[in-house]
Image (cartoon, rainbow, N blue to C red):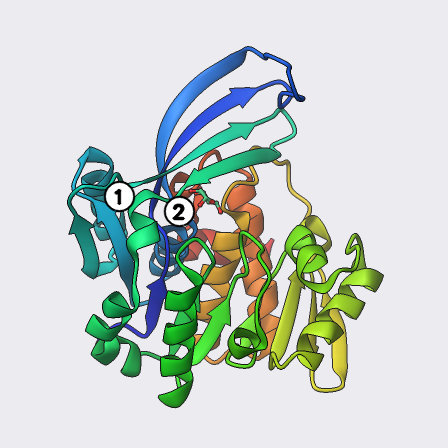
Amino acid sequence: MGPEIVVLGSLNMDLVVRTRHRPAPAETVIGTDFQIIPGGKGANQAVAAARLGGKAAMVGRVGNDIFGRSLLQSLERAGVDTSHVTSVDGVATGTALIVVDEAGENSIVVVPGANGRCSVEDVRAAEDLIRSAKILMVQLEIPLATVQFALEFAKENGVTVILDPAPAQPLPSAILEHVDIITPNETEASALTNREVTDARTARLAATDFLQRGVRRAVVKLGPKGAVFAEGNCVEQVAGFAVDAVDTTAAGDSFAGGLAVALIEGYPMREAIRFANAVGALSVTRFGAQTSMPVREEVEGFLRG
Ligand code: RIB
């Protein structure tokens, strides 16, 4: 059987520094260490799903350089099918400059590089792969025209679409109407609904807004407070897990991977969100993006308490 989860999206090499606090405008701070860690929202989601036992494939682009080769290796080590990741000449692999503070919070600047070349042609080349999958996962670090084309193709072929709208940008209804599940965090939900989303109450309002704009199910992530889920007339909160945060980088990507795997395994939505919350929480206890993602046994042990 081929991959059940196809991830279309970005691959970035993360250049990460740790500091006591993140610099304010015009401030210079001293960092404590520097690491180069495989990342990119798309690649992170694929790795998260594969570590949990999902059969995942990645569609995207890297540059023909050392970062690109290293990102491919990281995916392959996790068991992700990389046959639809193209190496392109003349453009660098995407990079992300990440500053992580003592509280585990981060600031990220992404330089898309080869991700900016991920095109409709890449989706066309992966049509058979997507058609035979159950879930297509997409984020917003590749061109929006590519995202839209892939969503339309997935919907025509009965493939469930999970959109993680990160980093947030205005989304036309032509995109939202093709989304089965949208998974913004508080910042993204605020940007996309023009509401300040800071807690479960405001997350409920935002989740309902997404449904009114054509999305089938909305999951607004609230970190340790869990997530608010809306579908039809039902809106409910699924509790999260409080952990000692080391680094929140890729918590949302870990959540997305967990959600996809749980849904493929037939978990009801509420249970799938609980599982995804646990995957996200575990990732927060470790440093880095792909370095922080748990394997299945760890998640099950965590959920058993
Ligand atoms: O979601 C975390 C990711 O965002 C990082 O790995 C970085 O590459 C950026 O894409």
Horizontal side of 267 relative to 89 (left or right) equals right
Q: Is residue 240 visible?
A: no
Closer to the camera, 232 or 165? 165
Closer to the camera, 108 or 250? 108
Above or below residue 119? Residue 302 is above
Q: Secondary structure at mark 1?
A: helix
Q: Determine which residue is flagged by label 2.
A: 40
Which numbered dot is residue 83? none
**Residue 43 screen position, x and y as percent:** 35, 52
Q: Amino acid at mark 2?
A: Gly
Q: Disc 2 or 1, which lies upstream in sequence? A: 2
- For label 2, being within 8 Å of ligand 1 is answered yes
Quarter of the view holding residue 155: bottom left
Quarter of the view holding residue 95: top left
**Residue 128 screen position, x and y as percent:** 21, 80
Q: Quadrant of ligand 1?
A: top left
Q: Determine which residue is flagged by label 1.
A: 71
Closer to the camera, 92 or 286? 92
**Residue 3 screen position, x and y as percent:** 26, 72
Horizontal side of 162 relative to 20 (left or right) equals left
